[in-house]
Image (cartoon, rainbow, N blue to C red):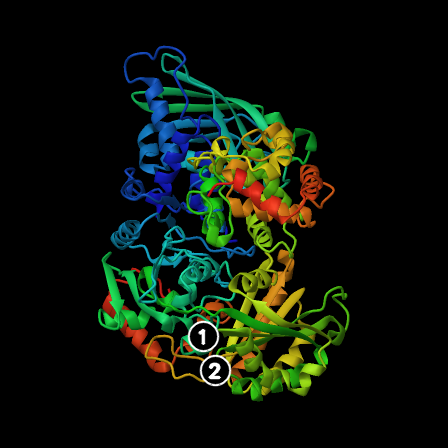
Amino acid sequence: MSRLALWSRRRFLHATAVSIPVATALSGAESFAAPAKGSDAAALQARIAGTVVVKGDAGYETWREAMIWQRAKADRRPDMIVQVERVEDVQEAVRFAAANGMKVTTRCGGHSMAACFLRDRGMLIDVSRLDGIAVDKAAKIAVVGPGVFSRGLAERLAEDDLAFPGAHCGTVPISGFLLGGGVGLNTNAWSQGMSVFAVKAVDIVTADGRLLRASETENRDLFWAARGGGPGLFGVVVRFHLQCFDAPKVIWGASYTFAYGELDAVTRVMDTVVPRLDKDVEVLFAVAAAPDVAEDAPVEQRQRIYLDINAFVASEAEGRRKLAPLLRDPLIARAIDRIENRAGSFDRYYSDNEASFPQGFWMGDDAWIDRPMEAVEILKRHIPNCPAPRGTPLLLYMGTNKMPEAACSRIGRFYLAYYMEWDEPAQEAASRAYCLKLFKELKSVSSGSYINEMDQEGRPEDIRDCYSPEAWARLARLRRQWDPKGVFHGFYGQS
Amino acid sequence: MKSLSPKAGLVAALLLFSGVAAGKALTTPQPAQDSATVVRELYEAFERGDMAALERLIAPDATWTYYGPADKLPFGGTRYGPAGVADFFAKVDETLENPVATQFGYIVTGDTVAVPGTEESTVRSTGIRYKADLVHVFKVRDGKIVSFEEFIDSGKVLLAFQGDKSAGIAAARPSLGSGAGKAIFTTCAGCHGNAGEGRAYMYAPNLTGQDPDYLVRQLTNFREGKRGKTDDAHGFQMVGRATAVPGPEGVKAVVSYIAALPKLPAAPVAQRPMPAAIGELVQTCATCHGEAGEGNPTMQAPALNRLDKRYIAQQLVNFRDGKRGYHTDDAAGATMAASAKAIPGQAEITALANHYGRD
């Protein structure tokens, strides 16, 4: 560690004429005992096309903060950040980490709300510049770099009349999203509930620096782990081979706004009506602030329920037909606002959805729910007390698919997520405490959590509940087999 | 935030003295064990945090003196030997933060080396940041430093310790550091491409070859609510990303990085036949954007021949529909919005975009 810091300091001094701001270069310094050669990190830099930054560099903090998408910057500092430019860089970096006893994590878009990729020790490999989309239209296969955004993938595939169940948020890269399982668009119809089941193979750099293909036929154990192992995966995926689907001609949809007092009624419709719809009709609702209502107004006045319905279909007529059973429900007539007969597209979906995710300070948590009425009973007790200026619970119907054999092994009929957003750092602690208390209580009605949006910082002890007991044990076994020296960090809180 | 370990603090304080990379002997070094070399080695040992070298370079009976009242400045007074030097730096670290050291050069006379410079630090207890002139005077014997004296404007330092704001200077903003531009560009690359070339599938324009001041202005507009309303479908996603840039200094850093990227070829506007329908409109455009759409920084007009056709068309629509150039503080945008309203319709917008834009 200190050798790296020293190397960095010297490099910085050489680059600077006279005036040396040194204070920023100090947090990692630990001892004088290290030999003066200190050029290991420089040697890594010489071997890769990417960028090596070490704790102690003058620019380190800027790099560290740039690794996190949102404004809440977790207070953890890896010893080294390596932003790779090509697959070979990943291999070099992993070998370097192994040789120097550093533990590796990987980031791409830095959207993990827990910033689980940021640890206080080791190397953070940034794969965000590994991009590229190659489409085999006839085979309906796309080979995609980890840095590709969900929105970009949708637009590119549309050129070939194809589609993929990407993330709901367009600026989320596909990599971390898929590795954690992926609660994606139209997964009930396309990919057995989770996007990762449309991953046919990955190219992955393993702990020994090798680049391997993992699929149903090659390195099957590794493939099993890559499909859901998420931040606990012992490798760096550098390419995804995706099964694509015929693009919908239209995303036919509608949105309805309800008074907060309809929460039970809306949930009941989600529980009893929505599951009878065709699988390519995706329905979710969010509880969010009504526009232009004071933050201290009673919850019934300041909160609204936004029900969003989207059918991924071949024609307007098909969309109308598929939405009809839901739109006939008496609930719909009680909407206080509505957008109907929406002939949408991925472009429109992502533009509309983007407005829900302004840049702010964020955290969140989630739970798999089979009986939503019970979950909403708990939610109703807590929502009035939410201290975050913007707290948004969301309930998405997932379907009842039998999941393929993979590390991704937990799901529920419903996905319940809750996002907290605040404006001032001082509002953080209360928001986190509220969220933690609520989700500890929700454990009584949930069947685990989705690793990607789970509050890994707040309740690391529950990370195992993102997996079935068998999958959790198998992941640990495979880790010992594929990464016997522990080159990769384990899940947050475990290394 | 955990406190620094004593050793880390020592490294911090040592570094205060290490900014000597540009130091040069101002007079010809004397023979024997070149005194300047020894002093240079000491500074380099500071630089590396190399304790073993310090012990080798500092005589066991060396004196280490900082001229100032020891009862009021904890690092003041005279100390002895390497242990005394370590104690000196520990006291510095306990009481000062964010030190910046400057050395102007070496003045060598026999076994004596004088190093004039400045020191700038913030006193932890008062928060006052001072900048004081100083001279370090070393005496070297048999390859070891036997005496160090720091002649510093300790009156100013003392005032800063006593909370007298007259001794203070404006605290420098913490530097984002070298390489900050590329670091910040991490948040841009996903849409604009690794080389800033733009990505049609993210509706993100080419950034290369564009006027840096224009880029700063637009990033600032996105940050400050002057561009990127929620109904600006592909502009709104910029608001979050621009807000993620760390402050105005970060905006400058990332734009500097972008400005240094290889430029993509501009659209060959001059070689393109002019559709009659936009012949007059183009005269208007040229007033600010130039004959070939090359842009004109003095008019705050961006290069159109660096942007792709779809982007230009979309922006013209945005200007016309009040989605851009709507803010009173965005004067250049307001000018463009007024001009865009003079464009008859979508056909002319398409023709203008095709005339100026890259394929």
- Give the x, y percent position of residue B356: 53, 38
- Give the x, y percent position of residue A177: 43, 65
On the image, which quarter does residue B81 sit in? top left
The answer to whether residue B158 of the structure is visible from this angle is no
Q: Which residue type does callout 2 highlight?
A: Gly
Residue A10 tag number: none
Residue at image point 60% right, 54% down: B236
Q: Are marks 2 and 1 on the same chain?
A: yes
**Which chain does the residue under circle 1 lie in?**
A
- Give the x, y percent position of residue B98: 53, 38
Q: In this view, does B13 lie above or below A469?
A: above
Does label 2 or label 1 sit earlier along the sequence? 1
Q: Mark 1 points at which residue?
A: A187
| The furthest residue to the front | B276
Q: Mark 2 points at which residue?
A: A399
Q: Which residue type does callout 1 highlight?
A: Thr
Tell me how far mark 2 sits from mark 1, CA to CA: 9 Å
